[in-house]
Image: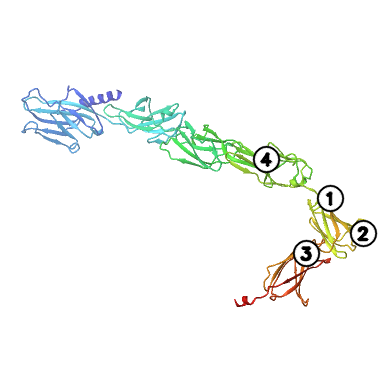
Amino acid sequence: MITWTVITLCFNFWLACVNSQIDINGVPVRTVVGVVDGLVTVPCQASTPDPSDKLELVLWYRLGSKLPFYTYDARGRPPGRGQHLADDLLSPRARTHYQLSPPGLVLSGLRQLDQGGYICRADFIHSPSRVGVTNLTLIVPPDVPKVYDSAGTRLLDVTPPVAEGQPLTLTCEASGGRPSPRLEWLWNGRALDRSFVATAVGVVRNDLTVPRLSRTDLHSELACAASNSNLTAPRSTAVRVEMLLPPLTVKIGRVPQHLRVGLTYEITCTAAGSRPAAKVTWLDGAQREMTSVRQQPSLDPNVTVSVLTLVGAVSGAPLTLTCQAANALLPRLVPLRSTKEVPVHYPPQVVLRIGKTLVPSEIKEGNDVYFDCQVLANPPITNLAWYHQGRQLTNDKKAGIMIIDRSLVLPNVSHSQAGQYTCGATNVEGHNQSLPVVLHVMYLPRCQTAQRVVYFVPGRAVQLRCQLLAEPGPVRFKWDVNSSASAYQREPLSRFTTAGAVSTVQHRLDDDEPAEIRCWGSNAVGLQRQPCLFHMMPAGLPEPPSECSVSNRTVTSFVVRCRPGRDGGLPQTFVLELRDLQTQNLLRSLTHEQPIFHVRGLNPGANFTLKVYASSAKGHGKVMLLRVGTVELMPDRIGS
């Protein structure tokens, strides 16, 4: 109001000084308001009460100017067909319209220099001239407001992201305009803050602080509007509220009732409500991050779908899966979590161990031995079995086998129970056996064969082989002999060889009398309790073969078969001597390990004497005599 009062006083002063060519004293002054770059009609008293009178001439002056800037000349022309004359400055922008009510001069494309006083004089044929005075006041719209954030950065269309619960501070500044503009903040089109201040440099400023943003404020529109007239729409700048939001929900999707070892599963986790999209991580039961993860595309930018690829593995407890969602730009907030436990089914995992109190390398015959079968299985096992050397064991106290729960007890263990042990377990997922555990049982040497009868020939050396069973090796051997040569006193034998648990001795008995040779050994456990005995018996002559028969006789051959007699204690062979029946000349001599002889290449129709007997290192036994002949060759057979 102060501005408009000053303008009016100045203008009235100017009217008092106007050129006297047009008397404007006492003429009321009209005020017209226009907007720069706009259009305005400056009124003119160019009408008369006499309808028969005609408008002849209209002159327009700028206040203080001696020459008109615009002329409408209708002299000598029909009504409304007058000539329009304007100076070069206004020619394209000014035009009179006397059909308007009231008539006036229309100015377009208004400029600031257009502001001021305008004088209009209208001349008629009969009526006296009429004069009008108008003061044109121009409104200069303000510049488009500029919006800044709290750091002084100019914003064009969106605010910096603000965390939920945090304040938002913006500044709006507008310059230019006449009169000075008003600034107003609008929230989604509704007035929010109309306070503003003018700075010393002609800038109008409005500082806005929204104390606490909530999730519902996301994408709200904050507009700063600058206006200084109701003739024009406010000039405004709008920004959209951007926010940082933590996730609202996180949920692990459907999980199988149980996992199976070796199978691959995909499990999803969905996080929603975060802006920007949440970072999803998977953790195992030890809170270690799981890496076999991929992100699944989502149509909703506020939804993150993470897919965990999981291979079922043996675990003593249910598998704990935790899906964690967080906004990476809000590190101080506690992440949301979703946790599920899922059991893992697998065949029994079986480990066999010898008793903790035992030293496997020091177990001796007679000790108590036990094994523990450690089983990890889900679901629980339905059967547990024990195996020795691949043969399943059962409870048998007489045999020294006791099965107690998941333990195998071997009281007073014997060397025969040494070897590989395994245990096996079964559940609905399958059956597994442990790796074998070898039980070593140390024991005194013992004879593989306790007693043997050995036949000998006096004066000839005989080789004896003593083989022991012992754990551990090596075995130290001793030999002695009890014979007539030693007056039946034990005499040590020192000339023998040893290889592992086997010892060999060669000894000669000169008398044709029975004798006894002993062998025994010792190892780390101790001395053998019972020696191995060799009963030395003088060998006899082999008995003659019996039940000899001749078969398969042909013109050139035949077969002799006999039953062998006793060998007299020494290895024997069988001899067949073939002699001519008439001359008793020796024709053949055959030796075999068995009394079976195939005699070939003989003359047809010949007769022979056969001697069959057994022979050994002791000599040969009695002779068995036979007579046999080949088949005679008949003439009709020759012809045929």
Mark 4 or mark 2: whose residue is earlier in sequence: 4
Distance from the alpha carbon under mark 1 to that under mark 2: 26 Å
Mark 4 or mark 1: whose residue is earlier in sequence: 4
Q: Position of residue 419 (x, y in %)?
A: 72, 48
Which type of secondary structure does the marked residue at label 2 adopt?
helix
Q: Which mark is residue 528?
A: 1
The amino acid type found where label 1 is placed reads Gln
Distance from the alpha carbon under mark 1 to that under mark 3: 44 Å
**Residue that mark 4 sits on:** 373
Mark 3, other Cα within 10 Å: few <14 / some 14–19 / many ≥20: many
| Quadrant in which the N terminus is drawn | top left
Q: Quadrant of residue 363?
A: top right
Mark 4 or mark 3: whose residue is earlier in sequence: 4
Q: In the depicted view, which residue is nearer to us: 614 or 214?
A: 614
Distance from the alpha carbon under mark 4 to that under mark 2: 60 Å
Distance from the alpha carbon under mark 3 to that under mark 2: 34 Å
Q: Position of residue 114 (x, y in %)?
A: 23, 32
Query: In the figure, 553 relative to 271: above or below?
Result: below
Q: How many tags in the picture?
A: 4
**Residue that mark 2 sits on:** 484
Evaluate whether residue 512 shows in this view. Answer: yes
The amino acid type found where label 4 is placed reads Cys
Q: Nearer the viewer, mark 4 or mark 2?
A: 2
Left or right, 193 with reference to 620: left
Q: Which mark is residue 545?
A: 3
Query: In the figure, 582 relative to 506: above or below?
Result: below
Q: Nearer the viewer, mark 1 or mark 2?
A: 2
Residue drawn at x 12%, y 27% is: 46
